[in-house]
Image: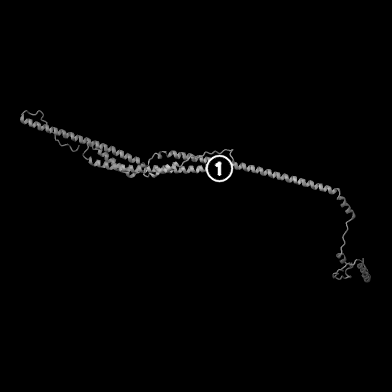
C-alpha cells in the first residue's frame, strides 16, 4: 500500500493551529532531525512529539474496581495473618532461646561434674604419693636408729653426728587429709595441694636422714678401720719381737714356727685387706693366741732350766758335803753315782 505525502502548506497550517492551542511558556528547541529520503522511506512519521510529551497509559476501570474490592475484608484478613505469623515467630524464638539455655545449663552441669571428678582423681593420686613418701620416711628413721646410737668419739668426724641430729629434728607431724567424694571441687584441689607439699617435704627429709646416717656410719667405719690397722700393725711388731727373743728359749719350738707363719699372714691382711676391720681383728686375735703359746713355751723352758739348775746346785752341795764327811769319816759312800753336769742342754 502506497501513502501519498500530505500537502506542505496544509500541514504547516494545521500544526500552527494545534501549537496555538497548547502553546507552552517556552517553546522547546527542536532537535536536528536527520533528513529522511522519502524515496526510500514510505512511512515518513515524526516520533519527536511522542518522545517529548509521552502521555500516561490509563489503567482500565475494571482493574481499579478490583483493587478497591481487595482493600475491604481482604485487608483485615491479611493483617490477621501477619499478626499470627509474628506471634508464631516469637514462640519459635522463645523456644529456641529456652532450648539453648537448657543445653547450656546441661553443659555447665556436665562440665562441673567433670571438674569435680578431675579434682577427686588428682587428690587421690596426690594422697597415694604422699602415703608412699611418708612410708619411706618412716623406714629412713628406723634405719637411722643404729646410727643415732653412735657418739662423737666413735667417729672420725664428729660433725656427722650433729648433722644426723638436725636431719631427724626437721621431721614434723603432718596434717592428715582425706579425699572424700562429698568434698567440694575447691576443697579437693586444696587437699591435693597439701598432699603434694607434704610429699615433697617427706622425700626431702628421708633423703637427708639417709645421707646423714650413712655419713655417721662411714665415719665410724673409717675410725674403726684406722684403729684396726693401728692395732694390727702394733700386734705384728710385738709378735716379731717375741719371735726374735724366743730363739732357743722355748721348750716347744713348734710354737715359734706357728707364730712366724701367723706374722706373715697378718702382713698379708694388712696390705690386701686394710679396709676389712673383721679380717684385721681376726689377724690380731690369731697373733695374740700364737704369742701366748710362745710365751707359755718360754715360761716352761725357763721353769725347766731353773729346776735343773736348782737340782744341780743341790747335788753339788750334797757332793761337797759328802766329800768333807769322807775326809773325817772313812766310811765308803753307799751311792757311787757321779754328779750330773749342772749346765742345761741348749737344745731344750
| Residue 228 in the figure: left or right of residue 37 | left
Quadrant in which the N terminus is drawn: bottom right
| Residue at image point 30% right, 38% down | 286
| Residue 305 in the figure: left or right of residue 238 | left
Using the image, determine if residue 59 lies above or below residue 273: below
Mark 1 lies on residue = 190
Residue 61 visible: yes
| Residue at image point 63% right, 42% down | 110
Q: Residues within 10 Å of mark 1 (few under 14, many from 20)?
A: some
Q: Nearer the viewer, residue 225 or 156?
A: 156
* Horizontal and vertical percent position of residue 166: 43, 43
State how the image is colored. one colour
| Residue 29 in the figure: left or right of residue 284 | right
Picture quadrant where residue 278 is located: top left
* Horizontal and vertical percent position of residue 280: 33, 41
Circle 1: element type: helix
Picture quadrant where residue 24 is located: bottom right
| Residue 162 in the figure: left or right of residue 184 | left
Q: Nearer the viewer, residue 82 or 37?
A: 82
Residue 273 visible: no
Using the image, determine if residue 64 lies above or below residue 262: below
Amino acid at each position: 500500500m502506497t501513502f501519498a505525502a500530505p500537502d506542505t502548506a496544509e500541514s504547516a497550517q494545521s500544526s500552527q493551529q494545534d501549537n496555538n492551542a497548547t502553546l507552552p511558556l517556552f517553546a522547546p528547541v527542536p532537535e536536528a532531525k536527520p533528513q529522511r529520503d522519502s524515496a526510500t522511506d514510505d512511512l515518513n512519521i515524526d516520533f519527536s512529539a511522542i518522545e517529548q510529551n509521552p502521555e500516561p497509559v490509563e489503567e482500565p476501570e475494571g482493574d481499579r474496581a478490583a483493587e478497591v474490592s481487595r482493600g475491604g475484608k481482604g485487608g483485615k484478613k491479611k493483617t490477621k495473618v501477619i499478626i499470627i505469623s509474628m506471634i508464631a515467630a516469637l514462640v519459635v524464638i522463645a523456644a529456641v532461646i529456652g532450648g539453648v539455655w537448657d543445653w547450656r545449663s546441661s553443659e555447665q552441669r556436665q562440665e562441673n561434674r567433670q571438674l569435680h571428678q578431675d579434682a577427686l582423681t588428682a587428690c587421690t593420686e596426690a594422697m597415694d604419693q604422699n602415703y608412699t613418701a611418708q612410708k619411706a620416711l618412716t623406714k629412713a628413721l628406723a634405719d637411722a636408729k643404729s646410727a643415732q646410737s653412735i657418739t662423737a668419739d666413735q667417729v672420725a668426724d664428729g660433725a656427722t653426728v650433729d648433722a644426723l641430729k638436725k636431719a631427724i629434728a626437721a621431721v614434723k607431724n603432718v596434717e592428715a587429709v582425706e579425699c572424700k567424694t562429698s568434698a567440694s571441687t575447691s576443697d579437693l584441689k586444696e587437699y591435693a595441694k597439701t598432699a603434694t607439699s607434704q610429699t615433697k617435704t617427706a622425700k626431702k627429709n628421708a633423703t637427708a636422714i639417709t645421707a646423714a646416717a650413712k655419713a655417721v656410719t662411714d665415719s665410724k667405719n673409717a675410725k674403726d678401720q684406722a684403729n684396726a690397722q693401728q692395732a694390727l700393725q702394733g700386734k705384728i711388731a710385738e709378735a716379731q719381737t717375741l719371735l726374735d727373743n724366743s730363739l732357743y728359749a722355748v721348750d716347744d719350738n713348734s710354737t715359734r714356727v706357728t707364730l712366724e707363719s701367723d706374722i706373715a699372714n697378718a702382713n698379708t691382711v694388712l696390705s690386701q685387706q686394710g679396709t676389712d676391720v673383721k679380717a684385721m681383728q681376726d689377724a690380731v686375735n690369731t697373733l695374740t693366741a700364737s704369742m701366748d703359746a710362745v710365751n707359755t713355751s718360754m715360761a716352761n723352758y725357763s721353769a725347766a732350766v731353773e729346776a735343773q739348775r736348782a737340782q744341780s746346785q743341790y747335788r753339788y752341795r750334797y757332793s761337797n758335803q759328802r766329800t768333807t764327811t769322807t775326809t773325817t769319816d772313812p766310811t765308803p759312800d753307799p751311792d757311787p753315782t757321779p754328779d750330773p753336769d749342772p749346765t742345761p742342754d741348749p737344745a731344750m
